[in-house]
Image (cartoon, rainbow, N blue to C red):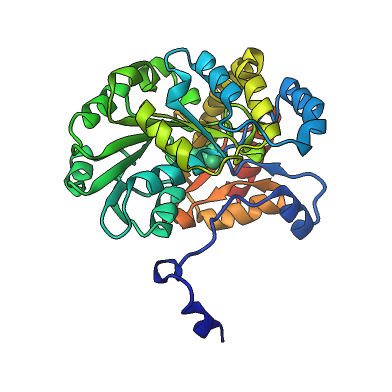
Amino acid sequence: MAAMETRRVRPELRDFEPYVAGRSIDEIKAKYNLHSVIKMASNENPLGTSPVVQKVIRDNVPLAFRYAQAGNPLLRSALAGYLGVVDAECLVCGNGSDEIIDLLIRVLARPGKDNIVAFDPCFSIYKVQAKLCGVEFRQVALDDNFHFPWDALLAKADERTKIIFVTNPDNPSGYAVPVTDLVDLASRIPEDALLVVDEAYIDFADPLEEYSMLPVFRKMTNVVLLRTFSKLFGLAGLRLGYGIMPPWLADYLMRSRLPFSVNILAEKAGIAAVQDEIFIAKTRETVLRGRRDLTQGMQAAGCTVYPSQANFLLVRPPMDPAIICERLLRKGIIIRGLGSYGLDAFFRVSVGNEEENRIFLGAITEVLNG
Ligand SMILES: *Cc1c(COP(=O)(O)O)cnc(C)c1O
């Protein structure tokens, strides 16, 4: 029966698997009968949701019956003010940057004709949305140490390539390239292609000036930047992200998007979050310090830890990561195995707050020492 009904579904969707997310706290509490669980699996903000933003969300709850203002003009101008170097007409907000990825593909790439190029492994949403749109998705293997082989990437692109995705800093490695590399890449891609640089983790790069493309954005004609409120701003569950792009492209995305995908509480929260300088600074400080402490602690426990410019670390432990993940779960700690990325020998751990990092390091040291 199921097989027969499957014939109704578009063939390109038949092998789809649901997105593999980090395990949730409630799921693990129930399964292992635990009172408290630490989640270091989904690169969320280790400080939680800013108290200032929480108050704004609470204060706006009575507005939940209203539609948000179409096109989110207040949020876009608050963002333009925060970013400082781009106009509001270059900004498109979405239900997470996932929505912007989806819109870019649907606005730019013709099903069955055009193609999209990215590295392998890469953020799974690029691939899933391309396939859903019936657009060919070409991938180029990363170098052994997770660095970017630019020439191989360019060799895959042709006159039918509409988008080249690069994640900087990269997920799941944390590796980042300097902005000069990306400016050079943009000058070498085919004429009809756009370079989409996913800067979901850019705020954790150190020093920021060396890595962010934002300061040079105005000089580029074929570059789109993706940003999110899910990491630095601690609003992953509210779903808010945005793209920075040439005005002509922003205009097409605004015309084709669903009008109310950014909900009214996300909009108010976003406006408050970009003005919350204390929380932003504290988050950055916590992540940079935690990244250093976790790196040293795991190295001392015998792990290979890859240099990271993000709020997580890619780790190659001296033991099967599946066993480590399972033993940590029993102790109430969730990290991310990377089987879904094809990286069976590695795990990824998000930087937690000071206490979480200490508990995690104690637990993994115990697991690795038998
Ligand atoms: C987390 C993440 C995002 C953000 O996605 P949202 O939809 O904004 O939550 C985007 N790109 C990458 C590579 C990420 O890891």
* Residue 176 shows in this picture: no
Residue 270: % across, % down: 63, 26
Residue 12: % across, % down: 40, 67
Specify the quadrant of the image occupied by residue 144.
Answer: top left
Q: What residue do we see at 36% from left, 23% from top?
A: 213
Residue 72: % across, % down: 58, 29
Q: Is residue 39 above or below residue 20?
A: above
Q: What residue do we see at 56% from left, 48% from top?
A: 336
- Judging depth in this view, the residue of 279 and 254 nearest the camera is 254
Residue 280: % across, % down: 60, 18
Image quadrant in which the N terminus is located: bottom right
Q: Left or right: 309 with respect to 182? A: right
Specify the quadrant of the image occupied by residue 297.
Answer: top right
Q: What residue do we see at 81% from left, 56% from top?
A: 33
Q: Is residue 185 above or below residue 85?
A: below
Q: Is residue 250 above or below residue 129?
A: above
- Judging depth in this view, the residue of 348 and 198 nearest the camera is 198
Q: Left or right: 26 with respect to 120? A: right
Specify the quadrant of the image occupied by residue 289.
Answer: top right
Q: What residue do we see at 23% from left, 31% from top?
A: 185
Q: How many marks?
A: 0
